[in-house]
Each structure stands twice: as structure tokens, then as C-alpha cells.
Amino acid sequence: MQRDEEISGLLLESARRHGLVLREETAVPDDTGWDFHVVRVLGRDGTAWILRRARRADLAAAIEAESRVLRLVGPCLPVAVPQWAVAGPDLIAYPMLPGEPAASEDVRTHGLHWRIDRADPPERYVDALARLMAVLHGTDLRELRDTGIPVRGPDAVREVFRTRLEIGRTELGMHKSWWDRGLRWLAEDRLWSPRAVLIHGDLHPGHTLVNSDGDLTGVLDWTDAEIGDPGQEFVEAARKFDPPTWDRLLEGYRRHGGPAWPGLREHVLNAIAFAPLALGVLGLTSGQPRYVEMARQRMGTAVA
């Protein structure tokens, strides 16, 4: 495994080759991400830069797709998104967006440090997040289908969940009551969106930036963007908060014209309940045993 100093050196060397003039002594590594090594560094003119380098060679196609998505949707969204000055497998570089993450994970304890009130987040934050989701989910898909991001229609969305259920039963020791609940959810057509939309895919508080007043100023990390299930977007956006915030977010989403359907709320509640299963499957595929164990503990007991 490469040390922080080695990763920083590789990123800074790549930045020099691409013509970025940086104060290299200010470089600070941030190694919390699964897919990318990250370094924060100041430019000679005082601009704060983010430098990213893929951890795996198989991310090259995903980087190209993310770059295309940002160019297409960035100008249309009500908050800032990264504007990549350099985009390639050896280096992604962009000026740091204003604000700080609404919540940051402690790399040792994995607990969250909150910059807003988790139990009662500011209304301006919840409303802005709902508006962002509504605008994003209303994006015209014609050009986006050619960006290289995954495209899953309504039937494919349900098939993905069916596959997760099977993995939960065979590899994660899922209790039969969870299996039964999952099958009931799958069988209810009214609980599933009749349309696919563009989703961010990982809209948890750590990827949302806020200012000192709790205003939503930007959204990071579009690596998991796809055309898929609009209800799934609510899982990471809402589940770190208390349940009353879930309804506030749903109400704001409808108010801002998000493509809601009659079974949206129940779909979201089911998706949040099954979030440990999705995390466990991700842990299996990405070699993250902590998430596999968390899923086994949660899904191995009967539905509450």
C-alpha cells in the first residue's frame, strides 16, 4: 500500500505536468474515499485545489462518464458542482468549491462530525436539497444516455434489488422475515417508480457542502451518477437524519416539482430499511469487511 507521501508526490507531479502552479508545501492528503486518493493544495495565486487520483485502473471509463455528466448538468443545477480543469486517470483537478461538508467521517472511529443539526437540520438546507433533487430528476435524459453512466429502466431497477435479496440470503445470512418483506415490496407495482431519472447516486451529507448558516452551496463526488430509481436518491440523502426530516425532504421534493408517484413515501421507507443490505453487497464486491459485518448484524435478525 502506498503511503500518503507517495500519493501526494504522484498527484503533485501529475499537476506539474498539466501546468498547474501549486504551493506544494501546503498539500494535505485526504484518504477517506473508496475510489480515489485526494490531496488538497493551494495554488500560487491562493486558489484552493482538489487533486484526485483513481485507486484502480478500471475507473478510467467512470472518470470519463463523470466528466461528461458534470459538463452537461452543472450549468442547470441550483448549486455548484466541481468544474474539472484536468480530467484523466492519473489526475482530476478542480478548484475547491465553497463551503464544508454537512458531515465529515472520522477515519478512525467512522463517526460523523456534523456542521448542521442532525436531529433538526436547517429548513434552508432541507428545502435546497429537495429542490436540487427535483431539478436533477427532471433533467432531460437524451444526451445523458450517451455519457457512459449506467442506465437502468424501472424493470432493471427491480431486478437489481431482487439480485441483492438473493445475495443477502445466500451470503449475508439474511433472516427469512427480511426476505419475505423484500419479496412483498417487489410484488407491489405501485411502490416502484414508473420512470427512470438521472440521480447523483450517493447524496449523503458528506457530499453536500454548506456555509456557516447551513445553506447548501455545492455537491461533490458524482462518481455514482446513473439513470435509475428516483426513490433510491432519498436513501443517502435522508437516512443519516431522524425520520421527521425524511418527510420534510419528500414534501419539498413534491413542492419543487420532483417526479413523485403515489407510492414514493413507502418506497423510500423500504429503501432506507434495506440500506444495510445494499451496503453489505457493496462491501462484498469492494472488499470492505466492516460493511459486510454491519449488514450481517442488521439483516441477520428479524424485521423489527
Image: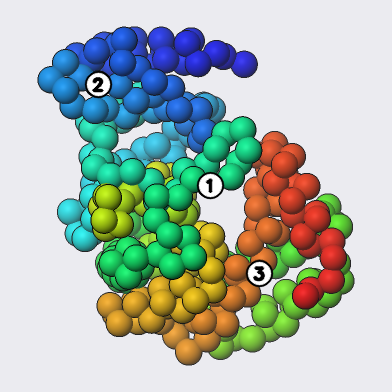
| Residue 119 visible to the viewer | yes
Residue that appears at 57% across and 34% down: 107
Sequence-first disc among 3 and 2: 2
Determine the CA span between mark 1 and mark 3: 20 Å
**Residue sitting nearer the eye, 289 or 159:** 289
Q: Residue furthest left?
A: 45
Residue sitting nearer the eye, 186 or 93: 93
Tell me the amino acid under the disc marked 3. Ala
| Residue hosting label 2 | 42
* Amino acid at pointer 2: Leu
Residue identifier under label 1: 112
Residue at 28% over, 77% down: 256
Answer left or right for 240 relative to 208: right
Q: Residue 136: tell me if it is visible.
A: no
Reading the image, the residue beneath label 3 is 273
Q: Quadrant of the C terminus?
A: bottom right
* Type of the residue with mark 1: Leu
> Along the polypeptide, which appears first: circle 1 or circle 2?
2
